[in-house]
Amino acid sequence: MTMSKIVYWISTGLLCLVYLGGAIAYLMQRSMVEQGFAVFGYPPYLITVLIVAKIAAPIAILTRFSVWLSDLAYAGILFHLLLAISAHLNAGDNGFFPAVVALALMAVSFLTQNVARKSPSANVPKQFGSALPRPVKAPSATA
């Protein structure tokens, strides 16, 4: 297994653990989460939406049932984490650090996915590699 594949699977596994752990925390400590959301001015019904998203996104990424769906999950995670960082910074607390770490994991996972997965995403910049075989150049004939 190449280093790129190891980096992909570690970052993806940790990202998925963060999200699934968050969903479990939201389920088990709902009243505490509602109080935290109230501090940010968010309505409590968003908690249910986030629980579903925190379960669905890792499933979409890990199963890779559809590359399009996997990329949509990465996009959802990106927006969620950016909004979480913004909310914590605006509230003036230090709760943004876990979201920054998860954002770094998400970026590494997304950018290395084409090296590790059989069906590549067209949304990953080419300089980060591809799962597609590279064409072999024929030796040039020199006279």
Image (cartoon, rainbow, N blue to C red):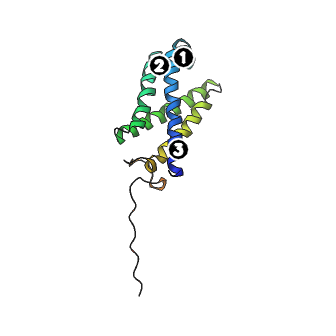
Marks 2 and 1 close (CB-CB < 8 Å): yes
Residue at image position (49%, 27%) is 20
Nearer the N terminus, badge 3 or badge 1? Answer: 1
Residue on which disc 3 sits:
108
Q: CA distance from mark 3 to mark 1?
A: 28 Å
The single residue placed furthest to the front in the displayed view is 1
The single residue placed furthest to the bottom in the displayed view is 143
Residue on which disc 2 sits:
47
Q: Of helix, strand and loop, which one carries label 1?
A: helix
Where, by quadrant of the figure, is residue 57 drawn? Answer: top left
Nearer the N terminus, badge 2 or badge 3? Answer: 2
Return the x and y of residue 125 as percentages of the image width and height: 45, 52
Q: CA distance from mark 2 to mark 1?
A: 8 Å
Instruction: Give the left or right position of residue 17, taking residue 64 as reference.
Output: right
Tell me the kind of residue under disc 3.
Answer: Val
Tell me the kind of residue under disc 2.
Answer: Ile
Q: Of helix, strand and loop, which one carries label 2?
A: helix
Tell me the kind of residue under disc 1.
Answer: Val
Nearer the N terminus, badge 2 or badge 1? Answer: 1
**Numbered tag placed on residue 33 in the rendering:** 1
Q: CA distance from mark 2 to mark 3?
A: 27 Å
Residue at image position (38%, 73%) is 138
Badge 2: residue crowd in 10 Å (few <14, some 14–19, many ≥20): some
Badge 1: residue crowd in 10 Å (few <14, some 14–19, many ≥20): some
- Frontmost of labels 3 and 1 is 3
